[in-house]
Image (cartoon, grey):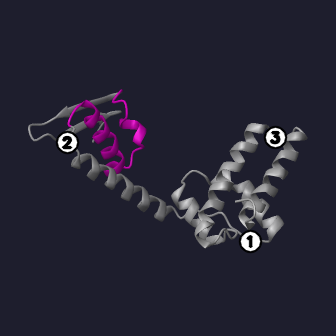
């Protein structure tokens, strides 16, 4: 909300970005793309009464939003320079991997709990399984293109990808 410290910081950050856009140093699209992660980080502070984010809030945001490190950098720099926040962008690789595995495991359990066993199930199962059991990206198993998939009598999948069997 506008009257909160978080709302005021977001408005100030938006004004700074708008002035850069007006000067031609960045595009309007860049302004929008920079505001989204800033607003998301500030929204995580809602639980503490819309106070400004601390290091714990930033760490939690980066853990739950993997891939946002570069996107949030400008806002963290703004917070450090304007509000002496002393925030440090750091990503705990072990926690990120653990959280990813937990999410994949939950997806596998949910998939098994469902009654669907069609071609879409097979595609989802292979995609999630390759990520969970073998550490491959989810997109590898999405289309099954370039994959050789065989199923044995017990229903186990054997996938050959780039000459390697999974």
Residue at coordinates 33% horizontally, 30% vertically from top-left?
144
Mark 2, Cα crowd under 10 Å, few <14 / some 14-19 / many 20+, is few
Question: Camera-side residue: 71 or 131?
Answer: 71
Q: CA distance from mark 2 to mark 3?
A: 50 Å
Is 141 drawn above or below residue 44 in the view shown?
above
Q: Are the residues flagged by discs 3 and 1 in contact, CB closer than 8 Å?
A: no
Q: Is residue 43 left or right of residue 101?
A: right
Residue at coordinates 33% horizontally, 50% vertically from top-left?
107
Q: Which residues are magenta?
A: 117-145
Residue at coordinates 77% horizontally, 61% vertically from top-left?
9
Is 146 drawn above or below residue 57 in the view shown?
above
- Residue 133's spot in the image, x, y percent? 31, 51
Which quarter shows the N terminus? bottom right
Q: Which residue is mark 3?
A: 26
Task: Specify which label sits upstream in the sequence, 2 or 3.
Answer: 3
- Quick one: which residue is furthest to the left in this view? 153
Of badges 2 and 3, nearer the viewer stands 2
Question: Camera-side residue: 129 or 147?
Answer: 129
Q: CA distance from mark 3 to mark 1?
A: 26 Å
Q: Secondary structure at mark 2?
A: loop
Q: Secondary structure at mark 3?
A: loop
Which quarter shows the C terminus? top left
Q: Which mark is residue 101?
A: none
Q: Which residue is mark 1?
A: 86
Residue at coordinates 48% horizontally, 60% vertically from top-left?
96
- Residue 56's spot in the image, x, y percent? 60, 71
Q: Quadrant of residue 83?
A: bottom right
Task: Specify which label sits upstream in the sequence, 2 or 1.
Answer: 1
Q: Which residue is mark 2?
A: 115
Q: Quadrant of residue 45?
A: bottom right
Task: Specify which label sits upstream in the sequence, 3 or 1.
Answer: 3
Q: CA distance from mark 2 to mark 1?
A: 51 Å
């Amino acid at each position: 909300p506008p009257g909160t410290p978080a709302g005021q910081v977001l408005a100030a950050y938006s004004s700074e970005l708008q002035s850069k856009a007006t000067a031609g140093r960045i595009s309007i699209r860049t302004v929008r793309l920079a505001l989204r992660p800033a607003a998301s980080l500030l929204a995580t502070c809602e639980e503490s009464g819309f106070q400004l984010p601390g290091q714990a809030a930033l760490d939690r945001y980066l853990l739950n939003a993997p891939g946002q490190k570069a996107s949030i950098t400008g806002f963290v720099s703004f917070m450090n320079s304007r509000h002496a926040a002393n925030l440090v962008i750091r990503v705990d690789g072990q926690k990120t991997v653990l959280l990813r595995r937990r999410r994949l495991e939950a997806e596998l359990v949910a998939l098994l709990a469902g009654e669907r066993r069609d071609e879409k199930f097979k595609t989802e199962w292979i995609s999630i399984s390759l990520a969970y059991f073998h550490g491959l990206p989810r997109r590898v198993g999405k289309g099954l293109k370039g994959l050789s998939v065989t199923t044995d009598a017990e229903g186990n999948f054997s996938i050959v990808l780039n000459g390697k069997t999974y």
